[in-house]
Image (cartoon, rainbow, N blue to C red):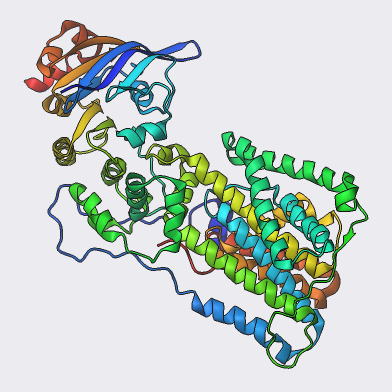
């Protein structure tokens, strides 16, 4: 299979701050890549550049063989780049149903014309589609709850459910920014299971995560960033024993967990 | 009382917490929630029609018909502004200027003996197009900056209205020819005069209201409200937020243009006074009192706030004080909704 995503020398500078510099990265379709590094290494910035939230300062981005460097975020989303946020970024006073309907409509037809035309067609209860979109995350009973009333874990899952439901094409690339932050072990296991099922549904996944135990068990490949640059890349086992990575980031934490 | 205190001190009256089964636990077999339909509209519709139609049977004093027309005009404004304010939550302070364009079009085109229906449609189109034209470059701005930019457009237009005397009559103004409204069927043997205009205005209010309501309850409304909440979040799902924001803004322009014609026909003479951004402010106050997202709320609030000073004529010099106090209390208590929510 060909490369789904390819970054050639991608950099993002904020004024004098070189948040991400000269990143070369390739990811084949179906892959599962973990992006790790110390705080401030540029992981979220890189994810934001891939999603089109920030334009890259230099370098080229290719998705499914197309040069998408100059594409804005909405255009990338339509091509199958789906991202979640590091914080629980939702519409606080809106219901879960509102969020999911937004996502479903985006996958069907995001144009303003389509949205307006439906105002003058007979009303159809969209619950079935919404339930189908929420079921993989076990949230279909929460349809009518407001987002801000949900517990933290459910808010994170809603973010993922929304992103997935809005993705109109397969293969898609799912960019998960610390999806299991603040979750307990059972919740982490559930979430990672859901992500694995999404891979079977045609998603290639890039995951940024600080929870090393959860990450190293799941991903196929790890990409390590440090101060905006690539430090190492390899299988989880290679990375866990890489002296440079242990020195810069992992420290003795991982070894401690293995005992 | 505690609710008012909470609102004043910024404490949310109710912070709802819900009981949720933990993630990963087996699901209960409880029935899934179904989305709630909107509240039915017909009681409100019936009430409006009843008041307007029955008025001549209660009194033949033209003063009441005039109050009814004013309530209708402000309701129409408020319904139009709800599309924007209840959607993307943005303020169009150039609203008064576009309103003026509609009124001046009416004065001029009716003077050329153009048919009334055509003028109404043209004014709506012109209002929408003009608003789209100045709105397009504003898409780069958001929130307060956006509001200030629309206000600049409004101030510019106010200057044009004074200076371009050939079209506007400047500060002297223009007369508006009488319009033959005999095509409007009146119930019973009554003096047509103001009543045909009241019927016309309220018919258009109901039409504009159904349109706004369907739009806000449709995917368009969902997306627009999403954009108002968090534009980048919604854009990341694949929506071009700018298209949605521009259409919502332009629709307020369509309402403004039509309102201008109705205003001109009602008053019979247009001067530049009412076309300042104070009109926009007044409309925005009405929309906020009615609950930003409730179209019926806008109509109720606009009618209430228009009729209130008339009712308060009995307290004479304390009129505006009482008015301001009522307004203040209503805003504090009714933070979000008065009637008929559009939320599913």
Question: Going 18% across and 36% down the picture, which residue do you hit?
Answer: A202
Q: In screen coordinates, is B65 left or right of A234?
A: right
Position in image of residue A235 (x %, y %): 12, 16
- Tell me if residue A13 comes above or below residue B175 in the rendering: above
Figure quadrant of the N terminus of chain B: bottom right
Q: Position of residue B214 (x, y in %)?
A: 48, 63
Residue with the most extreme right position? B172
Q: Nearer the viewer, residue B326 or A91?
A: A91
- Residue extending farthest left: A259
- B67 vs B305, nearest the viewer: B67
**Quick one: quadrant of the C terminus of chain B?**
bottom left
Residue B280, percent from left and from top: 70, 53
Query: With respect to residue B53, does B16 lie above or below?
Result: above
Residue pictured at 43% horizontal, 23% vertical: A70
Q: How many marks?
A: 0
> Is B69 situated left or right of A31 in this image?
right
A258 displayed left or right of B52: left
Q: Nearer the viewer, residue A134 or B265?
A: B265
Q: Residue at x 15, y 47 (%)?
A: B24
The extreme top residue here reads: A243
Q: Is residue A217 above or below residue B211?
A: above
* Image spot of residue B293 (x, y percent): 52, 59
Quarter where residue A40 is shown: top left
Left or right side of A30 for A22 = right
Q: Quadrant of residue A73?
A: top left
Whether residue B224 is visible: yes
């Amino acid at each position: 299979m060909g490369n789904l995503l390819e970054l050639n020398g991608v950099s993002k500078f904020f004024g004098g701050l070189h948040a991400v510099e000269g990143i070369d990265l390739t990811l084949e379709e179906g892959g599962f890549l973990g992006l790790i590094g110390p705080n401030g290494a540029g992981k979220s910035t890189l994810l934001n550049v891939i999603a089109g939230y920030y334009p890259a300062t230099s370098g080229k981005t290719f998705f499914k063989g197309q040069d998408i460097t100059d594409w804005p975020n909405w255009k990338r989303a339509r091509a199958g780049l789906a991202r979640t946020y590091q914080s629980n970024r939702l519409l606080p006073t809106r219901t879960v149903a509102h969020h999911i309907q937004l996502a479903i409509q985006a996958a069907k037809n995001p144009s303003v014309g389509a949205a307006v035309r439906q105002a003058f067609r007979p009303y159809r209860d969209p619950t079935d589609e919404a339930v189908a979109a929420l079921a993989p995350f076990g949230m279909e009973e929460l349809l009518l709850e407001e987002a801000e009333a949900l517990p933290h874990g459910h808010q994170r899952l809603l973010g993922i459910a929304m992103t997935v439901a809005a993705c109109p094409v397969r293969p898609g690339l799912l960019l998960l920014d610390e999806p299991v932050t603040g979750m307990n072990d059972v919740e982490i296991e559930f979430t990672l299971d859901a992500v694995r099922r999404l891979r079977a549904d045609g998603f290639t996944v890039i995951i940024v995560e600080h929870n090393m135990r959860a990450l190293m068990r799941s991903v196929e490949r790890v990409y390590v960033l440090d101060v905006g640059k690539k430090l190492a890349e390899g299988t989880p086992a290679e990375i866990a024993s890489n002296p440079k990575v242990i020195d810069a980031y992992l420290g003795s934490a991982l070894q401690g967990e293995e005992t | 009382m505690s609710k008012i205190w909470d609102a004043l001190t910024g404490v949310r009256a109710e912070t709802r917490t819900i009981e949720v089964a933990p993630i990963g636990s087996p699901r209960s077999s409880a029935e899934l929630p179904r989305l709630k339909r909107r509240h039915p509209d017909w009681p409100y519709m019936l009430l409006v029609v009843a008041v307007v139609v029955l008025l001549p049977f209660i009194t033949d004093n033209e003063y009441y018909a005039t109050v009814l027309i004013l309530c209708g005009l402000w309701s129409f404004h408020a319904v139009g502004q709800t599309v924007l304010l209840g959607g993307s939550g943005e303020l169009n302070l150039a609203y008064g200027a576009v309103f003026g364009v509609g009124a001046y079009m009416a004065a001029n085109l009716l003077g050329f003996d153009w048919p009334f229906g055509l003028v109404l449609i043209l004014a709506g189109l012109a209002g929408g197009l003009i608003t789209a034209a100045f709105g397009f470059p504003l898409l780069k701005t958001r929130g307060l900056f956006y509001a200030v930019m629309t206000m600049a457009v409004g101030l510019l237009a106010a200057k044009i209205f004074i200076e371009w005397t050939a079209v506007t009559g400047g500060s002297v103004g223009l007369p508006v020819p009488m319009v033959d409204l005999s095509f409007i069927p009146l119930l019973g043997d009554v003096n047509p005069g103001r009543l045909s205009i009241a019927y016309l205005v309220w018919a258009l209010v109901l039409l504009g209201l159904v349109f706004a309501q369907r739009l806000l309850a449709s995917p368009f409304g969902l997306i627009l409200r999403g954009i108002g909440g968090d534009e980048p979040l919604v854009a990341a799902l694949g929506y071009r937020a700018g298209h949605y924001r521009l259409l919502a803004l332009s629709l307020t322009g369509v309402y403004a243009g039509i309102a201008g014609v109705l205003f001109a026909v009602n008053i019979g003479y247009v001067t530049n006074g009412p076309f300042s951004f104070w009109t926009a402010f007044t409309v925005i106050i009405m929309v906020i009192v009615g609950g930003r997202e409730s179209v019926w709320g806008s109509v109720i609030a606009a009618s209430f706030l228009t009729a209130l000073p008339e009712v308060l004529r009995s307290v004479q010099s304390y009129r505006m004080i009482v008015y301001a106090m009522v307004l203040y209390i209503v805003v504090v208590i009714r933070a979000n909704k008065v009637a008929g929510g559009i939320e599913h």
